[in-house]
């Protein structure tokens, strides 16, 4: 399932729109980054349609977080992805990109360690574009969820909401959170009944608590965009202060080699950007150690000349809660978006942010289950 706007990143290879067929030019070889960038650019013109009303938590047949994958809403998410693929398929008879059988399990991108996907060939035998990238070839086992870290992230959210509220009382927010938990608890508890392990149950609890807290904070801040933005920045900053207080440019790690022309056309300070990404790298690494995510990847596509930074978060534990919030039209975003916004704002770099929810392993409707959070920080410019 994807939501929102545009993204050029390797891992988005499994999201398809008709515009991507512009890459299918027989007489030109495209670089992998050109391929990635084109995917993101075409998404602006052809976004997937998402149902505007959720049946989760508002009907007698409450399904809680299971709505993301098992309910009619969840099936609609997957169906919209597959339908978009079918539209693209009709536009090019040789286009077979969407078949999982095209995955070459013996090939991996040397930089990212992700599976290569063949795009198929035309009737004349010429290849369609360069191979796209999907799931990790050798996935790292996600570490057990650190309950203390989970509680810290949520406590920092509460603290940040109070800062953004302009002086409202903590009791009011805590009451709002408890009332929200009481409302949605039965739905989430049902989804956790079949947990195969204590860790899986703890992750279900994290989704429940994050969803309840974010929904309550939105109500507490009256849904005002300026207050929600102030909350996101405060939350991101306090997480960085907690997990990466001394990080800077030396800590920035990316699987992609830096190109001389990578940041040719920009008006912000390049070193400041790397300072921000160093803070993001260290914080994400700490969250990875706490089992909140399994793997992360930060890149600056060089063919966007410094205007885009992309962040991929595999096996992102609370992704279901965030999808549900987004599908129910709550303006608030999760901790990863708060981090990304905060580190750039701190170094006076403005950006637009687009969020995608991806299953990098398949396009099959029956199997589609998002596990990767993909962020595009685009239109970077000096504040």
Image (cartoon, grey):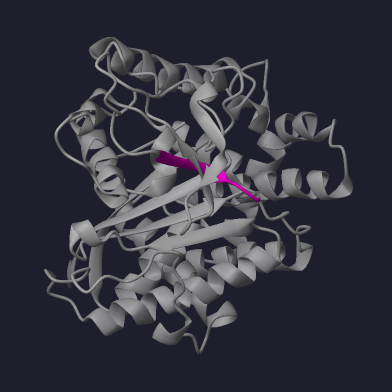
Task: Give whichever of 56, 132 is nearer the camera.
Answer: 132
Image coords of residue 364 (percent x, y) = 54, 20
Please tell me whether residue 134 belongs to the stretch shown in magenta: yes
Residue drawn 68% across the image and 16% down it: 61
Residue drawn 37% across the image and 29% down it: 119
- Residue 45 seen in this snapshot: yes
Looking at the rendered structure, the number of numbered marks drawn on it comes to 0
Image coords of residue 208 (percent x, y) = 68, 44
Residue 304, image quadrant: bottom left
Please tell me whether residue 309 belongs to the stretch shown in magenta: no
Task: Give whichever of 287, 96 is nearer the camera.
Answer: 96
Instruction: Give the answer, above or below, for where 100 lies relative to 259.
Output: above
User: Which residue of the protein is positioned furthest toward the bottom in this rendering?
Assistant: 246
Task: Give whichever of 347, 331 is nearer the camera.
Answer: 347
- Residue 55 seen in this snapshot: no
In the image, taking residue 351 as reference, residue 172 lies left or right, namely right
Residue 24, image quadrant: top left
User: Which residue of the protein is positioned furthest toward the front in this rendering?
Assistant: 125
Image coords of residue 149 (percent x, y) = 70, 67
Residue drawn 38% across the image and 62% down it: 299
Residue drawn 44% across the image and 71% down it: 234
Residue 133, image quadrant: top left
Magenta segment range?
132-138
In the image, taking residue 266 as reference, residue 299 lies left or right, namely right
Instruction: Give the answer, above or below, for where 202 lies relative to 50.
Output: below
In the image, taking residue 322 as reference, residue 207 lies left or right, namely right
């Amino acid at each position: 399932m994807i939501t929102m706007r545009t993204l050029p990143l390797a891992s988005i290879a499994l999201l398809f729109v008709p515009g991507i067929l512009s890459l299918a030019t027989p007489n030109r070889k495209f670089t992998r980054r050109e391929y990635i960038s084109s995917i993101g650019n075409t998404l602006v013109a052809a976004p997937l349609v998402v149902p505007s009303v959720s049946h989760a938590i508002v009907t007698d047949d409450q399904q809680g977080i299971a709505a993301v994958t098992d309910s009619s809403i969840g099936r609609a998410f997957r169906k919209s992805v597959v339908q978009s693929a079918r539209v693209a398929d009709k536009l090019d008879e040789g286009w077979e990109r969407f078949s999982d059988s095209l995955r070459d399990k013996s090939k991996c991108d040397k930089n990212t360690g992700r599976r290569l996907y063949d795009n198929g060939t035309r009737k004349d035998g010429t290849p369609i574009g360069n191979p796209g990238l999907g799931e990790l070839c050798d996935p790292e086992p996600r570490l057990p969820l650190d309950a203390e870290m989970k509680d810290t992230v949520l406590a920092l959210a509460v603290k940040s909401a109070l800062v953004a509220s302009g002086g409202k009382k903590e009791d009011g927010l805590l009451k709002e959170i408890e009332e929200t938990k009481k409302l949605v608890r039965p739905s989430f508890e049902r989804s956790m009944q079949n947990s195969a392990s204590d860790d899986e149950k703890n992750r279900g609890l994290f989704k429940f608590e994050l969803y309840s807290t974010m929904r309550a904070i939105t109500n507490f801040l009256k849904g005002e965009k300026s207050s929600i933005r102030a909350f996101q920045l405060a939350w991101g900053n306090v997480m960085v202060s907690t997990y990466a207080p001394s990080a800077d440019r030396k800590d920035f790690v990316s699987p992609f080699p830096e190109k001389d022309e990578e940041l040719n056309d920009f008006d912000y300070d390049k070193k400041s950007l790397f300072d921000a990404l160093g803070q993001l790298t260290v914080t994400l690494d700490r969250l990875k150690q706490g089992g909140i995510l399994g793997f992360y990847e930060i890149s600056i596509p060089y063919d966007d000349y410094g205007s885009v930074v992309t962040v991929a978060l595999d096996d992102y534990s609370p992704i279901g809660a965030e999808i549900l919030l987004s599908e129910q039209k709550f303006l608030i975003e999760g901790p990863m978006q708060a981090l990304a916004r905060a580190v750039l704002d701190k170094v006076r770099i403005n950006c637009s942010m687009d969020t995608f929810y991806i299953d990098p392993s398949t396009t099959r409707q029956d199997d589609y289950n998002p596990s990767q959070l993909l962020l595009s920080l685009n239109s970077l410019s000096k504040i």
